Amino acid sequence: MEKILIVDDERNVHYSFRRVLGNEYEVISAFSAAEAVEKATDETLRLVLLDVRMPDRDGLDTLQELKRLRPELPVIIMTAFASAETAIRATTLDAEDYVVKPFDVDSLKRLIAATLRRQAPQPAPAAPPLVALGHSAVPILGHSRAMQEVYKIIGKSAARDVTVLITGESGTGKELVARALHAYSRRAKGPFLALNCAAIPEALLESELFGYERGAFSGATEAHPGKFELAHGGTLFLDEIGDMPLLLQSKLLRVLQERELYRLGGRESRRVDVRIIAATNQELESLIRTGRFREDLYYRLNVVRIALPPLRERGQDILLLADYFLSVHRRADTQGPQGFADDAKEKLLAYAWPGNVRELENVVASAVLNARGHLLTAEDLALNDPSPRTAETAADQPSATTLESLFVRHPGNVFATAERLLIAKALELSRHNQVQAARLLGVSRNVLRDRMKRYGL
């Protein structure tokens, strides 16, 4: 039988593991971190399951010591507190995986079997050094299985210095993930710069990225470095990469390939050392098919892909996030709301959240401002009808002409409610694709973004 070490200070946990795994493996126990390190010297030991909270030493510190002692020994972290920081740190420190208590027995058995199958016979290289960070370094919340998978990918790819493509609907937290990748990388002490490719006019985007020399254009009275140079030694986050013009896509590709650039009006190349993290809420594969995105650039960006789940697929995280945003936006005085009433929780859980986490924060912030008691009620939450979407007919779908006339003829506050509903409907019909929604509404994307921000969509 293959030997497995269980490290936990609770005796009932060891009993459960022996009962579940005893017929397939030789299960041995350690009740402290010191005992775990001692027993890990046994060369016949094939796997360790380590609790993250130990009485004599932090489980992640123990993980580091085990990896120094035996780099090839796979360690699975066990935790009852599935925070983003714990998950990412565990993966960054070369944990094989981690599981959240209480366990699903069948899933745990499959994980153990798969880990033992792929255990390398030769020692693996030691884990890279971890940058010391405070708890606030990774402001990502979520205990759902979907977010646990995101944390694992962040932990595995943060220190590798590879290009990462983050996909997901608007408002899912793509920039937070980019910041986490930077914070847990070897570039953590370098700059982190973010640029929204859709928010800057095409004529200015090139100079923002690559900089310019004095006299490069009218008004260029002195040289100016671009984002690539300013992010040297750090990370550059390119949001809405799908909106980057084709000409700039080719120049970005050159920077990724050659690690050098030319400023506008410049004749000398400049070397840059920048990690690129890109994000989009569009399907780049579709843009490639229509000739709006370079296929070679796509493959350069899509080395590691992190797909963020929409909030509607993170049901168990909604109340957790709502409580966090309440703590952030709650008024300092003791008369402010201290929590959510049951009817408010039901309303939060029933809503589809087309604007994802960003919309949830805006809804909670607005409710805090208008609260009348110690608990936020369903009446305090300004949400659309959360009832399931019914089959649509042509008559149900708003036409672009109708929507455009509303924007043009009735810009005043009297029609704000109707405008918000129409925008929400357009976003729903377009599956929250802002380009398509703006086209349906007959307005520019910048106008749509302004209205979405105004109404918390």
Image (cartoon, rainbow, N blue to C red):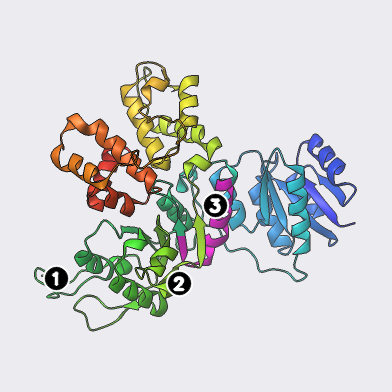
Compared across the picture, whether 196 is left or right of 89 comes to: left
Disc assigned to residue 110: none
Q: Let me know if residue 151 is in the magenta part.
A: yes
Against 303, residue 321 (above or below) is: above
What amino acid does circle 3 point to? Answer: Val
Give SS at disc 3: helix
**Whether label 3 touches label 1, CB < 8 Å:** no
Residue 254 position, x and y percent, is 36, 78
Q: Which residue is mark 1?
A: 222
Residue 114 position, x and y percent, is 75, 58
Q: Which residue is mark 2?
A: 300
Give the CA separation, mark 3 to mark 1: 44 Å
Q: Which residue is mark 3?
A: 150
Tell which circle, 2 or 1, labels the residue nearer the N-terminal end: 1
> Where does the C terminus fall, quadrant-wise?
top left
Give the CA separation, mark 2 to mark 1: 33 Å
Residue 155 position, x and y percent, is 56, 56
Q: Residue furthest front?
A: 394
What amino acid does circle 2 point to? Answer: Arg
Give the CA separation, mark 3 to mark 2: 21 Å
Tell which circle, 3 or 2, labels the residue nearer the N-terminal end: 3
Tell which circle, 3 or 1, labels the residue nearer the N-terminal end: 3
User: Which residue is rendered at x = 38% and y = 26% of the image?
Assistant: 381
Give SS at disc 1: loop
- The kind of secondary structure the magenta stretch mainly shows is helix
Q: Which residues are magenta?
A: 146-165
Give SS at disc 2: helix
- Quadrant of residue 145 within the rendered picture: top right
Name the residue nearer the viewer: 346 or 164.
346
Compared across the picture, whether 52 is left or right of 338 comes to: right
User: Which residue is rendered at x = 74% and y = 58% of the image?
Assistant: 115
